Amino acid sequence: MRKLKKTNKRIVKKKIDRKGVKRKDSRKNISKKDLKRNVDKKNFSSKRVKNTNKKLQVKKINAEVHKSKPDLKGQKILESYDVKLSDMDFKITITFGPSITKRYVVSLPELGIATKALLEEVKADLVSKVNISSSEILDPKEINHIRKKFKEQANVLLKKRLINLDKNTERLLVSLLIQDMLGLGDIEYLLADEMIEEIVIMSATENTRIYHRKHGWLETNIKPNSEADIQNFSNIIARRVGRQITTLSPLLDAHLLTGDRANAVLFPISSKGHTVTIRKFSRDPYTVTDFIKNGTCSSEVFALIWLCIQYEMSILVSGGTGSGKTTFLNVCMPFIPPNHRIISIEDTRELQLPEFLFWCPLTTRESNPEGKGRVDMLDLLINSLRMRPDRIVLGEMRKKEQAEVLFEAMHTGHSVYSTVHADSSVETVRRLVNPPIEVPPNLLSGVNLNVVMFRDRRSGLRRASQISEFVDAEGELVSVKPNILYRWRPDIDKQVSHSKPLKLFEDLNKFTGMSLVKIKNDLTEKKKILDWMVKKDIRTVKEVGAVMRDYYLNPKSVMKEIK
Ligand SMILES: Nc1ncnc2c1ncn2[C@@H]1O[C@H](COP(=O)(O)OP(=O)(O)OP(=O)(O)O)[C@@H](O)[C@H]1O
Ligand SMILES: [Mg+2]
């Protein structure tokens, strides 16, 4: 019996012995050195197995990549230029005829069948090879890091499988891989083009359309492969901002990592198929210099807006859809003195302010599928008042509750900037005092200046069409009416002064003690600075911001410089 037990023990020991690491690991008095030796041994042996496997599998092929020459027969070439994506240039051709719409043709790289198949294989391999932690996926700032990891690994994998791989082809293939795996595939070409304002993925059966700064709506030669691809894009966009888009919640409004605003609607709510609309965020945002140059608004009017912003007056920008309200608001923000605390509240991040401003951007959040975690504009608005703001910027005023808080904030001494959907100053008053916004007319006096944006749909021209103040209207149905200070004359394409301010200068005098003469001198000075900026082409957000900062630190030295 004892003998039998002994042999049994030996058998058990042998079994464990064969498992190598496990045996030593499970022993209590194991030394670290032993463990390391074992792990090394194990790794070595598994590496050897993997290597021999690979030797069997990997068959090198020739990289086959061509620059495509799109068929432009019968079409008139209107313009052609290069767009840079991942350090590579892609040719864009804009053509006209024989179809009704103008076309936007990207010369997409063409891959041979074997190269295409190989890329698919590499993709699958990359997914298993690159370790990405969930925190990296959820942190939008980590995307560059993830991209780098993918790039490095993709380089290794491609080199293993392709012969005669020159540097350019390698870069192209790697960027195609990254574009497909981490980006929005062919849509990335459109995102890279500065001239595109809007991208509309219609459905998988139609070509994607774009709105071009110069040519308006164009049809592109880019079409999603399948409806699943479009849903996948929507998912990528949603996940990055911690939201979800599903058949149960088929609407999504979010911003991409690049700052672009994306809206997705899934089938069957969008009956032709899934659709995604991307409003591109300018990589190089418009500034006051650009707007004076392109005629959106004169330096004289901007000087007035600047003065109002400097002395904490509240401004409302009105206009139709896509008329440029948000952009105009953004252009005016650098006028805020750098030591003022700014809180901005938006549904999706659109505003871009110079770095040195004392700015805290807040964005709303939709609820999760269980209906929890929603943070809306009203929550943020109420919260912002507890953050000791000097200036509150609300992306868009849509609801009664928002308007109530906003007007309350104005009357408690904050200066407020927001946009509202209305085509003129008269319409703005009407919209504000009637449902659904329904602000009591007497509160409207809190708005010191109303700028109305206009967009000519045909030409795409955008102009500040009216600049008004709200004044008392005695004996009329609504006790407030606009007094138009400047209006845009389409025949001469200029803003001309219309009526004298009745209230604005009085308010300024009340707040600052500035006399009318002093106000006029200040306006002349500001106009001079703006004209000088246009002349010197001081136009980026950073450059314009720097002039404003210098001005607030030492206005005299700026005036000296421009003389
Ligand atoms: N003055 C301008 N000149 C040229 N392009 C402009 C001008 N203002 C805005 N744009 C462009 O027009 C597009 C729409 O602008 P923006 O988002 O500011 O409009 P919006 O009125 O706020 O739209 P929405 O009604 O959707 O809020 C943007 O792509 C922007 O770059
Ligand atoms: Mg807007």
Image: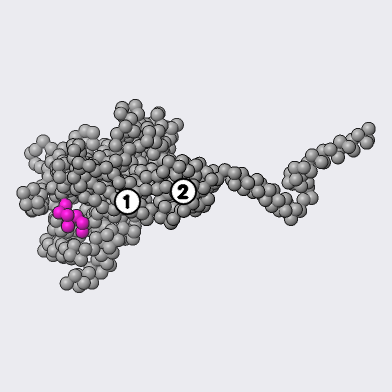
Residue 13 higher or lower than 521, as above or below: above
In-image side of 445 versus 13 (left or right):
left
**Disc 1, SS:** strand
Q: Which residues are magenta?
A: 289-296
Residue 46 badge: none
Three-letter code, disc 1:
Phe
Asked if residue 254 is among those painted magenta in the image, a careful observer would answer no
Q: Which mark lies nearer to you, 2 or 1?
A: 2
Frontmost residue, 473 versus 138: 138
Residue placed under numbered mark 2 in the picture: 62
Residue at x 62% of width, y 48% of height: 51
Residue 90 badge: 1
Q: Position of residue 535 (x, y in %)?
A: 17, 65
Residue at x 82% of width, y 41% of height: 13
Q: Quadrant of residue 407?
A: top left
Q: Position of residue 477 (x, y in %)?
A: 11, 36
Residue 270 higher or lower than 470, as above or below: above
Three-letter code, disc 2:
Asn
Q: Is residue 76 visible?
A: yes
